[in-house]
Every structure is written in C-alpha cells, then in structure tokens.
Image (cartoon, helix red, strand yellow):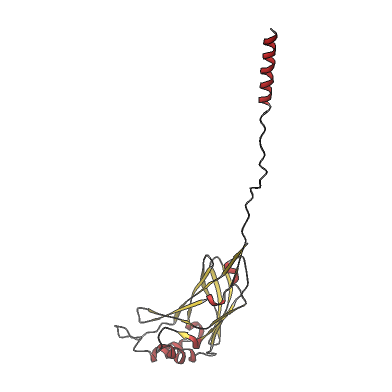
Amino acid sequence: MKSMKTLSIALLSAAFLISCGGETKKENTESTEAVKETCVYSYVSDSTTLKWTAFKFTRRAGVSGTFNRIAVNNVKSADNPVDVLVGADFSIYTPSVNSGDAERDPKLVEFFFKKLANTETITGKIVSVNEGEAVVTIAMNGKSVDVVGKVTVDGNKVSLATSVDMADFNGLDAIVSLNEVCSAKHTDEDGESKLWPDIDIVVSTVLKKECK
C-alpha cells in the first residue's frame, strides 16, 4: 500500500509540473530590428546631357543634336533623386549647338538663333515636380513660358522629357528663316519644304548616391 501511495504522489507531482508549464522557454535577447539604410543624392555637373530633336518634311523626320555648353545652378542634396533638381536653373549656350553636321551647325546659329532676341543663351528653371510631371519655365526670345514635362527615375539617373513650340515664344520667323536657307534639305519626295515649329527635348543627369 505504501508503494502504491508513493507512486500516486509521484504521478500527481509530475502532472502538476506539466500543467504549470514546467518547461522553461529560452528568451531571445538578440535585437531583430533591421538597420535602415539612408541615402543622399547630389548633382554631378558633368553628367548632364541634353538631346533636342527637330522635325523636317511633312512626314516629320527627326533631326537630333545637343549643345556642348550647358550650365546648371542652384541644385541641392536630397534623399529623393527628383528633389535635387527642383528649383534648379539652367543656361544653354546656343553657339555651342552640335547637330553632328559641321555644315549645318553654323546655319543653325546664323539663321535660327540669331533671329531670336538675346540669342546667346536660353535660360530656364525647374519650378516643380509632382507625380512624375514637371513644370519648367523657359525663357527664350524675350518670352518666359511654362512647359510641362515627364520625369522618370531609374536608380540614380533622372530624365526630363518635354517639347517646346516656337509659336509660344514668337519664334516662327526663326523657323521660316532656317527653312528658307535649308530648303533643299527640307524638301521631301512630295516636293514640299517643311520645318516644324515644335522641338522635342530630353535632359538626363546621373546623380551621385551616398548611403550610410
């Protein structure tokens, strides 16, 4: 009887320990919080490129080029690539136009840009960027016009694509002047000489990215 009593007490004690969580859980004292990386973007002056595309012929064949001298100022560092350029102003030096054709470039200067007021530079400012859309103020031929462009970001590369219409800048006389001197080059199989007043522009820059 005594042995049976002892066995019963042992079983009851074991059941009590199990029901009260007799196992001890090991606490994880290690922090699981991930370290968040913070990055800052800044402007790199020699990384900016500008491509312009004008259109000739009634079927709108593109002729592209760039400018060898572009200055960008009032940029800032920011944790968002787009914010680096908001508020920045720029100057494009028109005598540095480069279409890849040594015969064409002097004609662009003489018969197009010199037909505009303040012909040496085209200036502007990036006013705002919201949800991939930018507002840029461009000053040319004595007029300031707000144009809307599309902004895309690919890593640390930011691109702005827009279009300007020379009619908005009272610049149709310059279009006519250039078309007249280049009439043979602007005449297609239909026999019509045509230079369109709108010009597409794409500006791209690669920002410096520093992360901690």
Q: How many marks?
A: 0
In this view, the residue in front, 126 or 92, is 92
Q: Position of residue 74 (x, y in %)?
A: 62, 77
Question: Where, quadrant-wise, is the N terminus in this rendering?
Answer: top right
Residue 188, image quadrant:
bottom left
Vertical arrangement, residue 5 with respect to residue 96, above or below:
above
In this view, the residue in front, 203 or 169, is 203
The residue positioned farthest toward the front in the image shown: 3
Q: Position of residue 184 (x, y in %)?
A: 34, 89
Residue 181, image quadrant:
bottom left
Residue 78, image quadrant:
bottom right
Q: Residue at x 69, y 22 (%)?
A: 16
Q: Position of residue 145 (x, y in %)?
A: 55, 80
Q: Position of residue 93 (x, y in %)?
A: 53, 86
Question: Where, quadrant-wise, is the C terminus in this rendering?
Answer: bottom right
Q: Residue at x 54, y 86 (%)?
A: 121
In this view, the residue in front, 75 or 115, is 75
Vertical arrangement, residue 185 with respect to residue 134, above or below:
below
Q: Is residue 39 left or right of residue 185?
A: right
Q: Is residue 197 left or right of residue 190?
A: right
The residue positioned farthest toward the left in the image shown: 189
Q: Is residue 49 left or right of residue 15?
A: left
